[in-house]
Image (cartoon, rainbow, N blue to C red):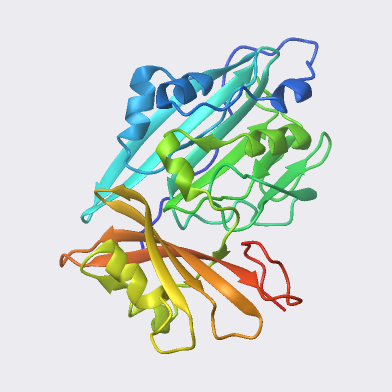
Amino acid sequence: MRLLLLTIVLAACTSDAPEAVTPDPAAETAAPPEATDDLAARAAAAGLSAAQAQQLVDLGVPVIVPALPERWSLADFSAEAEEYDGFRYPYYRLAYRHAGGVCFAIEAASEGIGDVFLGEPPHSREAEVPGVATYGPVVLGWADEGEVDAEYDVPHVRSEWFGADGLAVNLGSDAAEGCLRVTPDEAAALLGGLRYLDPDDDALALGPLAFVDLANPIVGDLASGPTPEAAATQVFAQPEGEGAAATAVEVLRRRPEHVVVLVTNTNLPDDSIRDERVRAVVRPGDDGAWLVTEAGRQVRCRDGRGHAEWGPEPCL
């Protein structure tokens, strides 16, 4: 069952007027602190108190945070989860401010949020977010001083929504409300430094995934079972008796209401795709069955038919 999703509008952080001289935080932005494997240390590196980190953990979903360079601090924080018709809809917002007055915010809410860019922004580029699971690279769009687009009348930079665990994430920065905008290069560097608050969630980041359309009846009608592993296996495992293909099923992360299962099929009876793996998000349904609510796919190609490493691109 797909979740009903929230509509969120990203707002710039507020504070006193910025300094007259704009700093150049690019070098700082591009060199975040070294990652650790401790949740408390990651929380501190994201400017979060212990109480704020616990609020995010209590949302029950993989939470994505930055590793802040020097002279950045948390300016605003919110985290909540609404209950509706038996489902929880988590939301959080982390707004940051540089010592020189530059601001950006990270906002996250339940999947299915409308596109950030209703019209084509004046400028755009792709950015990589290797520390978290995404469906392909993230699109950044921006407008410089003197430029406007359909949604914004101030200089700004924003990412399209991204994420792959029932939570969509956005990074944005506006030259408004006492803040200066980060540059597109700084925004890309911040995206590249994002990671999970809980190091146990690092297993979820397999690299970019190709989105699997569960609305297809052939997939969606089968995507349930008595356990998370059974639900994912039923629809994504290679059928028995087809060549020498083998299937392995692994749980990447288990929570009471959120299990991520990896189904890997090797030596497929296909002349271009050698191996395939599907990363499935599985949640409990009303009748005790587990339902696949989201999935992403990667493949490895046969010799001469494309990429030999796991990736979302199709084989030739």
Q: Residue at x 47, y 33 (%)?
A: 93
Left or right, 80 with respect to 118, comes to left
Give x and y (percent) for residue 112: 46, 58
Up/down of 54 relative to 157, above or below? above
Left or right, 313 with respect to 251, comes to right
Q: Residue at x 68, y 47 (%)?
A: 128
Is residue 77 at least partly visible in the picture?
yes
Up/down of 213 relative to 174, above or below? below
Is residue 181 at least partly visible in the picture?
no
Left or right, 222 with respect to 206, comes to left
Image quarter for residue 135?
bottom right
Q: Which of 120 and 221 lies nearest the eye of the viewer?
A: 221
Give x and y (percent) for residue 248: 41, 67
Give x and y (percent) for residue 222: 33, 79
Q: Residue at x 31, y 52 (%)?
A: 258
Q: Residue at x 52, y 44 (%)?
A: 169
Tell which residue pokes out farthest to the front in this image.
Answer: 244
Up/down of 76 relative to 147, above or below? above
Tell which residue pokes out farthest to the right in this image.
Answer: 146
